Every structure is written in structure tokens, then in C-alpha cells.
Image (cartoon, rainbow, N blue to C red):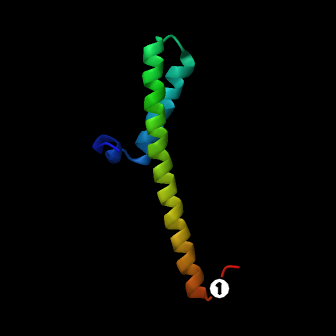
Amino acid sequence: MTSTQEALGYEQARDELIDVVRRLEAGGTTLEESLALWERGEELAKVCRRWLEGARARLDAALGEEGDEDGATEV
């Protein structure tokens, strides 16, 4: 991932992805522009996915610690 992508927060990437989708849905772009938008959208989706996976891992870890403190075990 490039440093620009690493610097993007989840909300920034999501908002830009929404804009990319709107532009693709609106049409009126050349094939080359559409391909470039599609590629950018794929990159942004990966950034969002990484953020969400990281958030899920943090939640799972926090819930696991909470379960450990309560003496609960998972079956």
C-alpha cells in the first residue's frame, strides 16, 4: 500500500469511494476514465476493508479479554 493510502482514514476512503461510485453510475466518462475510476474504487475498497478488519480484530480482542475477566469460556 502506498503512503497516500496508508494516510487515508476510513471515513476519507469511504467518502471518496462513494464519489467514485457516483461518477461511474452517472456515466459520461470515456472507457479509459471509467477504468481508472474502477481501479481507484478497488484500492479504496481495500483500504476500507483493512480498517474494518482491524476494527473487528480490536473488538474481538476486547470481547475476549472481557470474557477472560468474567471467567467465561467459549465453546
Residue lying farthest left?
Answer: 3
- The residue shown at (49%, 59%) is 55
Question: Looking at the picture, does residue 1 appear above or below residue 20?
Answer: below
| Numbered-mark total | 1
Task: State left or right for residue 23 relative to residue 71.
Answer: left
Give whichever of 21, 38 is nearer the camera: 38
- Which quadrant of the figure contains the C terminus? bottom right
Question: Looking at the picture, does residue 61 appear above or below residue 35?
Answer: below
Give whichever of 36, 55 is nearer the camera: 36
Question: Which residue is identified by label 1?
Answer: 72
- The residue shown at (50%, 48%) is 49
- Which quadrant of the figure contains the N terminus? top left
Please rate how many residues cluster around mark 1, counting C-alpha atoms within 10 Å: few if below 14, some from 14 to 19, many from 20.
Answer: few
- Where residue 20 appears, x then y in whole percent? 48, 27
| Element class at badge 1 | loop
- Where residue 73 appears, x then y in whole percent? 65, 84
Question: Looking at the picture, does residue 43 appear above or below residue 61?
Answer: above
Identify which amino acid the numbered label 1 is placed on: Ala
